[in-house]
Amino acid sequence: MQITSNPLSLFSYIGDNNKADDVLQDLAKGNKKDVSGGLDVLESGLNRGAFEETLQLFEKGEVDIDLNLVKNYYKFNQEKLNREVAHLAENFDLGSEVRVTIQDGALLVAGEADNSKALQQYIDKDNRLSTLIQQTAKLSQFVEWGQAKQQAAIYKSEDMPEAQLVDFLKDARLVVTQSNHFIMSEMGSTFYSQGHTQRLIDNNSKQTE
């Protein structure tokens, strides 16, 4: 999935120290907005396939939502996906990991083996499964980006240099601007986006040791 939405507002302010500082201070203050209806907006956006539009609404502050609600939504979908994958494992060879690229609204199974081609045909025909995979992938990306913004607030409160903080947010932003991947095996499933923010946090911690 390639997302080409407008950049986060902070990035529009790079080069304008006053505006950038205002945005970073807002991050440090935390979110005090009413989250009522935020989950409905998110679900509606996912159902309409308007992830980019919905993401922009949240980033502009026009709607808000408790990140824990999104996490629970994501976990619920992930559990459903794991059950689906368990059924797939009965009919397809998932002994080794199978990677499915999610790009431009399409699911592309990696590999040229007969099994990969058969799995591709199955996914193409099963609209319900295809939708579940794509929606859960977007939720995973949304969770990662939400966690990144929370961590940015912590870094700001710890007086991290602004340039370093902007670099962190740029790297974190890649989770929603790059194609995602769905990875499944007989053991279950996951997304390439999962853990993206924590990896950045861990790398940052190593650099400051």
Image: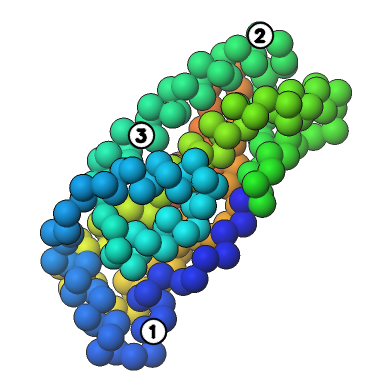
Q: Is residue 94 left or right of residue 205?
A: right
Q: CA distance from mark 3 to mark 2?
A: 27 Å
Res 14 label = 1
Q: Which element type, helix, strand or loop, lies under badge 1?
A: loop
Percent position of residue 1, x then y: 61, 51
* Residue bearing mark 3: 73
User: Pointer 3 and pointer 2: residues touching (CB < 8 Å)?
Assistant: no
- Tag nearer the camera, 3 or 1: 3
Q: Which element type, helix, strand or loop, lies under badge 3?
A: helix
Residue at 34% from the left image edge and 79% from the top image edge: 163
Report the quarter where the C terminus lies: bottom left
Instruction: Give the mark, 3 or 2, whose residue is nearer the N terminus.
Output: 3
Q: Is residue 182 left or right of residue 172?
A: right
64 in relation to 157, above or below: above
Percent position of residue 31, x then y: 17, 59
Res 90 label = 2
Q: CA distance from mark 3 to mark 1?
A: 33 Å
84 and 159: which one is in front? Answer: 84
Instruction: Give the mark, 1 or 2, whose residue is nearer the N terminus.
Output: 1
Disc 1 crowd, CA 10 A, few/some/many (<14, 14-19, 20+): some
Instruction: Give the mark, 3 or 1, whose residue is nearer the N terminus.
Output: 1
Residue at 22% from the left image edge and 80% from the top image edge: 22
Residue at 72% from the left image edge and 15% from the top image edge: 92
